[in-house]
Image: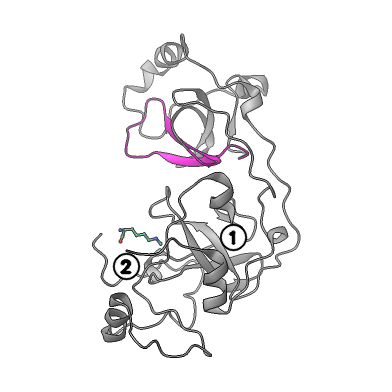
Amino acid sequence: GRKHFNWDSYLKETGSQAAPPHCLRQSRIPPSNDFKVSMKLEAHDPRNVTSVCIATVIGITGARLRLRLDGSDNKNDFWRLVDSSDIQPIGSCEKKGGMLQPPLGFQMNASSWPMFLLRTLNGAEMAPATCFKKEPPKPTPNCFKVGMKLEAIDRKNPYLICPATIGDVKGDEVFITFDGWRGAFYYWCKYDSRDIFPVGWCDLTGDALQPPGNNVSITKTSAKPQTSPSKATRRSMQSPHKSVPASAPARGRKPGRGKPLGSTG
Ligand code: MLZ
């Protein structure tokens, strides 16, 4: 079977460096996750960020919560760190003079929202304020360099955290590429994005870091050819797409639609 992914040997094999932790907007020690499934809280609607909605904790993974907006469907779950500024205790919105909003795609008639809100909060277990941790400060400036390794959320499969490499740096943005996967998964983000983590993050939170894909060959200039290439390596040698693209697509442009080679979906 496949060996458990190990950053130390992977960094050696690829002759690469981990991004220094101070480059990332993450606490050095991941915050403890004190939430419980079914607790309710307030969250910004990811599809309409000016709206503050009621959300329920559907799952717990490492320092993150899987959230579902009350009154929404089960197709739009999203994940937030317990120290994300997108979440707050119930009552915070009202305290600031705001009003809780129905989520985008509220499944009932808009006029039923006030009654829905009353019912959804009635008898609900509200996450206590102590569960919410302070967001770490923004690092300054952008100190990422091309080639640095990190762990990053796969935005197409946001429950996954995967080994990644900085593919490009432009101003306050970085291009996240996924080791062993083709461009369809790559994305640009702000250097202080909460979706990127230092090497070793998943080990500390207990998240399962995904192993790199085996669809793109990992090259190290000094590497000796293997005497007996693995199945994956042989497959990638036969493939017409052997390596990661030499340059990142322009920011703003949609990434390619291609699936990773050999992907089963
Ligand atoms: N099996 C899925 C998951 C891919 C995850 C890639 N992460 C960078 C697929 O092939 O689409």
Indicate yes or no whether the magenta region holds residue 89.
Answer: no
Q: Which mark is residue 46?
A: none
Q: Is residue 231 visible?
A: yes
Which residue is tagged 2?
257
Task: Give the image location of residue 77, x and y in percent.
Answer: 39, 38
Image coords of residue 216 (percent x, y): 37, 76
Report the residue at 66% width, 25% height from top: 130
Q: Position of residue 30 (x, y in %)?
A: 63, 44
Pointer 1 local density, CA inside 10 Å: few below 14, some 14–19, many at least 20: many
Q: Earlier in the sequence, mark 1 or mark 2?
A: 1
Residue 167 visible here: no
The quadrant the C terminus occupies is bottom left
For label 1, the residue is 199
Front-most of residues 25 and 222: 222
Quadrant position of ligand 1: bottom left
The crowding category of the residue bearing disc 2, from other C-alpha atoms within 10 Å (few below 14, some 14 to 19, many at least 20), is: few
Image-quadrant location for residue 225? bottom left
* Residue type beneath disc 2: Arg
Magenta part of the chain: 61-84
Q: Is mark 2 within 8 Å of ligand 1?
A: no
Is disc 1 placed on a helix, strand or loop? loop
